[in-house]
Amino acid sequence: MIIEPKTRGFICLTSHPEGCKSNVLSQINYIKDHPTANGPKRVLVIGASTGFGLASRITSAYGSNASTIGVYFEKPPTDGRPASPGYYNSAAFETQAHKDGLYAKSINGDAFSNAVKAQTIKLIKEDLGKIDLLVYSLASPVRQHPDTGEKFKSTLKPIGQTFTDKTVDFHTGEVKEITIEPCNEQEIKNTVAVMGGEDWQFWINALQENDALAEDFKTVAYSYIGPSLTEAVYRKGTIGRAKDHLEATAFKIKDQLKAINGEAYVSVNKALVTQASSAIPVIPLYISLLYKVMKEEGIHEGCIEQIERLFNERLYAENMTLDSEGRIRVDDLEMREDIQAKVLELWKIATTETLPEIGDLEGYNTDFFNLFGFKVDGIDYDKDVNEMVTVPGLQ
Ligand code: NAD
Ligand code: NA
C-alpha cells in the first residue's frame, strides 16, 4: 500500500516501514563508527522500540556486539493498516541484527505486568543466563499496578499554582498562550505511580530473585531536568515528582546490588523530539528554539549521539563524573550557560511571526515526522510498500 502521514493533534496515526528502517540503519551506521570499549554483552532494554530506548539497544548491539532483548508496547500491522513506528523500528533492527549474526529477540506487551516480567526472565534464563545491563526507558501515559490492578494515569500539570506561558502548535506554527491549572494531590501520586521508579525497582527485584543479574551488572534509567522556562510544567510539576522518585530509586537499587558489585544510575538526557515529548505543553517551543541555537553552535545531538556519549564517555568510561545529586549528565551541552542565555532571549521575542526566523520549527517538524518514518531522505513515498512486516525475534 501507499502510506501517507495522518496526524491528529500531537500524534501521527500512520507510520512508514521503509522510513523507519532507514532511520534504524542510520543509527546502526553511526554506532559502527563509534564502538564501545568494554561495553555490555547481554542487555535488556525496557522501552526498546523508539527514542532513547531504541538508541540504547542499537548502541549495545553495534557498539559492543551485545545480545539484546527488547521489551516494548507497539501495535502490529493489520491488513490495510500500518503498524506503530516502534514495531517497524524493531522489525528493521532485528532483521539487520540477525543478518549481522547478533542475537536479538523481543517481547511486545505491557512491561508493567507480572506476566511480561516472567516471560522476559524465562527468555533470559534460557538464552543468555544473566544480563549485564538493564536500560529502563519507558514513557507511558498509563500504568496498571501488577498486584492491585489499580489503574493510574499520569498528568503534565504544575503544582500549587496556575501556569501561563507560550507554546507552539508545531503543525501550524502558531505561537499562543497556554494556561494550565494546578494538579491535585491524587494527580501527583498517579503520575509518580506511572513514571516514577516503582516499576524499575520491580524489574530489578524480579531479575535478582531469579538470579539473572551478572557480577558487575549495571542499570540506567532516563530523566530530564531542563531550564527554568519549563520548570513549572516539567521539573517542578507532576512529571518532575515522578522523576524525583525515579532518581531516588537509583540509590535504593544500588544498595540492593552490593553483593554483585552492581551499579544503578539515572542519566539526565537532552530534550529531543519523541512521541513522549511532543505531548508536553511548552516543550515543543523550547525545543524549536534550543535546536536552532545548538545547531548554530554545531553541538546538536539526536537520541543516538546522546546514548553513544552516555556509553562511551560515562557508563563504560574509565572514570565517570556525576553531578552533586549523583546523576549522569548528558544534557551538559543543552544546559551550557551560553546556550540557555540565548534560548531565553529568543523565548522573549518568540511569536507566530518571528518563530520561523528565530526558531528551528522546520527541524522540529521534520524530526516529528521522522519518528513515524516520514520525510526521511531517500524514501520514495509514492511507492507501494508492504505494511505487513514482521519482527523476526518476536516471542
Ligand atoms: P518514547 O515514547 O520514544 O519511548 C517509549 C518506549 O516505551 C517505547 O519503546 C514504547 O513502546 C515503550 N512503552 C510504553 N509503554 C509501555 C508499556 N506499558 N510496556 C512496554 N513498553 C512500553 O520515549 P522517550 O522520549 O525515548 O522516553 C524514554 C525515557 O527518556 C523517558 O523516561 C523519558 O522521560 C526520558 N527522557 C526523554 C527526553 C525527551 O526529550 N524525549 C529527555 C530526557 C529524558
Ligand atoms: Na525509549
Image (cartoon, grey):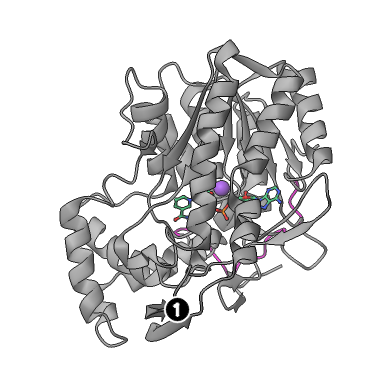
- Residue 233 image point, x, y percent: 44, 67
Q: Is residue 343 visible?
A: yes
Q: Which secondary structure is most common in the magenta stretch?
A: loop
Q: Is residue 374 above or below residue 65?
A: below
Residue 193 position in % (x across, y down): 65, 52
Residue 15 visible: no
Q: Give coordinates of residue 81: x percent, y percent.
A: 76, 67
The image quadrant of residue 363 is bottom left
Q: Compared to 197, does 35 lie above or below? A: above
- Looking at the rendered structure, the kind of residue marked 1 is Thr
Packing grade of label 1 (10 A; few <14, some 14-19, many >=20) is some
| Membership of 78 in magenta stretch | no
The residue lying toward the viewer, choosing from 362 and 173, is 173
Q: Which residue occupies 66% across, 29% down?
A: 204
Q: Identify which residue, 20 or 344, lies in the foreground.
A: 344
> In the figure, is residue 322 to the left or right of 297?
right
**Residue at image mark 1:** 162
Q: Which residue is painted at 29% across and 68% down in the image?
A: 289
Q: How many marks?
A: 1
Segment tinted magenta in the rendering: 377-390
What residue is shown at x 53% (from left), y 67% (from top)? 156
Left or right: 13 as drawn, with respect to 329: right
Which residue is painted at 39% across and 78% down in the image? 167
Task: State left or right for residue 318 relative to residue 183.
Answer: left
Would you place residue 35 above or below residue 108 in this image? above
Element on which disc 1 rests: loop
Magenta region includes residue 387: yes
